[in-house]
Amino acid sequence: MKRLLFLLALAAVSATAPLNAASDAEVAARKLALEIAGAFSNDGFKLRDGNWCGKFEPGKPALVQVNLYAGNQYWFTVGAGEAAKKVAVTVFDETGKPVATEPYADASVAAAGFAPKNSGPYYLRVEVTEGGPSAFCLIYSYR
C-alpha cells in the first residue's frame, strides 16, 4: 500500500510540475552536473537529451519518472547551488522499492549509476541531505 501511495504522489507531482525557462541558478546547477557527466562520457556514456531543473529543499525532494531499458547502463547526475552542501540521487523501481546503485557524491553534486534488470518505468528522488534550499539540475547518461 505504501508503494502505491508513493507512486500516486509521484504522479501528482509530475503532473503539476511547471514548464518554465531555466533560471540562472538552474543553469549553474546544470553546468555542475555536466562537469561530472563528462567523466562518464570518457567511458562511452552518451548524454541523454533534456534535463530536469527546479528547486528543492531539505525534507522536500524532487521526484522524476524515467523509462529505462534492460541491457543499458545509466548514470543519473545532479548538480545544485551552493546552499545545498550535500545532495543525493536515489533510484526506485516501478513498485517504489529502492534499487542498488553505484553512488558518487561531492559537495553539491551527486550521481547514481546502475544497469536495470528489467525495462520499464523507474523513479529518481533528488534531495538535499545537508544545507538549505537550492536550485538543482538532473541529467542522465547511458550506454
Image (spheres, grey):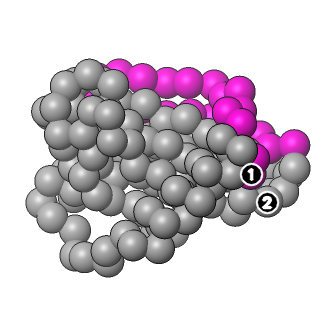
Q: Is 35 left or right of 113, judged from the image as shown?
A: left
Residue 81 is situated, as x and y percent measured from the top left of the image, at 18, 40
Q: Amino acid at mark 2?
A: Gly
Image quadrant in which the N terminus is located:
top right
Residue 75 is situated, as x and y percent measured from the top left of the image, at 59, 42
Residue 89 is situated, as x and y percent measured from the top left of the image, at 49, 36
* Label ID, residue 94: 1
Q: Is residue 52 among what the camera can see?
A: yes
Q: From what the image shows, is residue 22 above or below residue 66?
A: below
Residue found at x 28% / y 58%: 54
Magenta stretch holds residue 96 = yes
Q: Amino acid at mark 1?
A: Glu
Q: Nearer the viewer, residue 54 or 5?
A: 5
Q: Is residue 30 among what the camera can see?
A: no
Q: Give the mark nearer the N terminus: 2 vs 1.
A: 1
Magenta residue span: 94-117
Residue found at x 39% / y 73%: 16
Residue named by callout 2: 120
Which residue appears farthest toward the front when viewing the image?
1
